[in-house]
Amino acid sequence: MTEGDYYARQARHAPGDPFANAADAAHERQVAAAIERCWQCQLHAFAPYAALDWFATRDDMLRAVIECKARSHAHDRYPTVFLNVRKWLALQLAAIGLGVPAMFVVKFTDTVLWTPVGVEMGAVEIGGCARIVKSHADIEPVIEVPIEQMRALDGGER
């Protein structure tokens, strides 16, 4: 193996990756397992730092692209949940380019809700956290997705 051999390299991640922690990973695994069970598909993670979280396959065919968010409160605490415009743009582009639906899935403390991502999703606002939590660029345009338009992942009550 030569020093510049692309296939022999070690994968490296930035130390202290500010975009994910152990709790985030655990939530994603829980949601991924629930989606796979409910939608009878297999989820595959996009590469680290990709614009979207997952793509879904069934019968070895691409079926959907998915963005997932985990919230630390019950689904009925606020009337909306934020979807970053940059994520919405990536979902729209992937859906159009790949010819599959785009889904936005949110894990709340009491349920998992989802909605197909369309052109009209909700009001666009400037949102984010003024205190740096994950990123220096946390304040950005967001879509306020109405909770009432979301469906329960398991098909039950919200």
Image (cartoon, grey):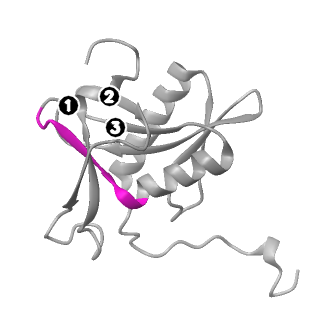
* Residue 81: in magenta span: yes
Give the image quarter of residue 20. Answer: bottom left
Mark 1 touching mark 2, by CB under 8 A? yes
Inter-mark Cα distance, 2 to 3: 9 Å
Q: Earlier in the sequence, mark 1 or mark 2?
A: 1
The outermost residue toward the front is 120
Q: Amino acid at mark 3?
A: Val
Q: Which mark, by number, is residue 106? A: 3
Q: Earlier in the sequence, mark 1 or mark 3?
A: 1
Inter-mark Cα distance, 1 to 2: 10 Å
User: Quick one: SS at disc 1?
Assistant: loop
Q: Which residue is mark 2?
A: 150
- Foreground mark, 1 or 2? 2
Give coordinates of residue 62: x percent, y percent. Answer: 69, 38
Q: Which part of the image, by quadrant, shows the N terminus?
A: bottom right
Q: Amino acid at mark 2?
A: Met
- Foreground mark, 2 or 3? 2
Q: Which mark, by number, is residue 75? A: 1
| Residue 147 visible to an observer of this rendering | yes
Residues in magenta, as a range:
77-86
| Residue 20 visible to an observer of this rendering | no
Q: Which part of the image, by quadrant, shows the C terminus?
A: top left
User: Quick one: SS at disc 3?
Assistant: strand
Give coordinates of residue 112: x percent, y percent. Answer: 33, 28
Q: Is residue 88 left or right of residue 99?
A: left
Q: Amino acid at mark 1?
A: His
Residue at 56%, 36% in the rendered image:
101
* Residue 100: in magenta span: no
Residue at 50%, 19% in the rendered image:
38
In-front residue for pair 72/85: 85
